[in-house]
């Protein structure tokens, strides 16, 4: 049975903003960046040519290494980011000292 899913192994990565204002980090990218065990990260996205950096919690769906993060309200309102818009994830830097227990 073939594996399903999005195969992304490096940045930058283009993603669609979900209806709940979250962005998916596929499992393959999460593993490649080594962010599987981190709770928070400093994330830089690009939207309409503007680089935007913010801190976000890395949400962990069950039974997978993928992660999601919510774009903060002040960022969405300030730059006009809406659900179903496309953003480019340029950088994901885990916050030191905030690993989840293994």
Image: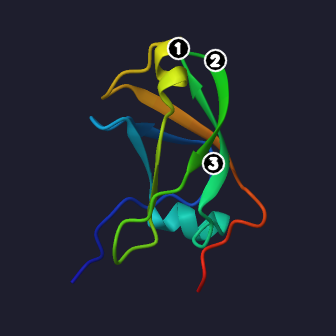
Q: Residue at x 21, y 84 (%)?
A: 1
Of badges 1 and 2, the one in the foreground is 1
Q: Which residue is mark 1?
A: 79
- Looking at the rendered structure, the secondary structure element under dot 1 is helix
Mark with earlier residue (1, 2):
2
Q: Which residue is mark 3?
A: 11
In the picture, measured across the screen, residue 26 lies left or right of residue 78, that is: left
Residue 9 sits above or below residue 52 on the image: below
- Is the residue under label 1 in contact with that under label 3 (CB below 8 Å)? no
Q: In front of the other: label 3 or label 1?
A: 1
| Quarter where residue 99 is shown | bottom right
Q: Looking at the picture, tell me which residue is in the foreground, 6 or 20.
A: 20
Query: Given the current orientation, which residue lies at the most extreme right position?
Result: 96
- Mark 2 or mark 3: name the one nearer the start of the chain: 3
The percent coordinates of residue 57 (x first, y second) are 55, 51
10 Å neighbourhood of mark 2: few (<14), some, or many (≥20)? few
> Is 81 placed left or right of 13 in the picture?
left
Q: Is disc 3 surrounded by few (<14), some (14 to 19) or many (20+) residues within 10 Å?
A: some
Circle 1 crowding by C-alpha within 10 Å: few under 14, some 14–19, many from 20: few
**What residue is at 54 percent from the left and 13 percent from the top?**
78
Contact flag, marks 1 and 2 (Cβ < 8 Å): yes
Q: Secondary structure at mark 3?
A: loop
Position in image of residue 80 (x %, y %): 45, 13
Measured as percent of width and height from the top left, residue 13 is found at 54, 44
Disc 1 versus disc 2: distance between alpha carbons? 9 Å
**Dot 2 corresponds to which residue?**
50
Which residue sits at x=36%, y=66%? 61
């Amino acid at each position: 049975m073939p594996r399903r899913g999005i195969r992304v192994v490096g940045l930058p990565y283009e993603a669609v903003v979900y209806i709940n204002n979250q962005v998916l980090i596929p499992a393959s990218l999460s593993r490649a960046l080594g962010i599987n065990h981190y709770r928070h990260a400093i994330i830089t996205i690009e939207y309409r040519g503007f680089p935007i950096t913010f801190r976000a919690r890395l949400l962990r769906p069950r039974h997978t290494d993928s992660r999601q993060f919510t774009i903060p309200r002040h960022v969405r309102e300030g730059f006009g980011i809406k659900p179903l818009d496309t953003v480019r994830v340029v950088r994901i830097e885990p916050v030191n000292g905030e690993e989840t227990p293994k």
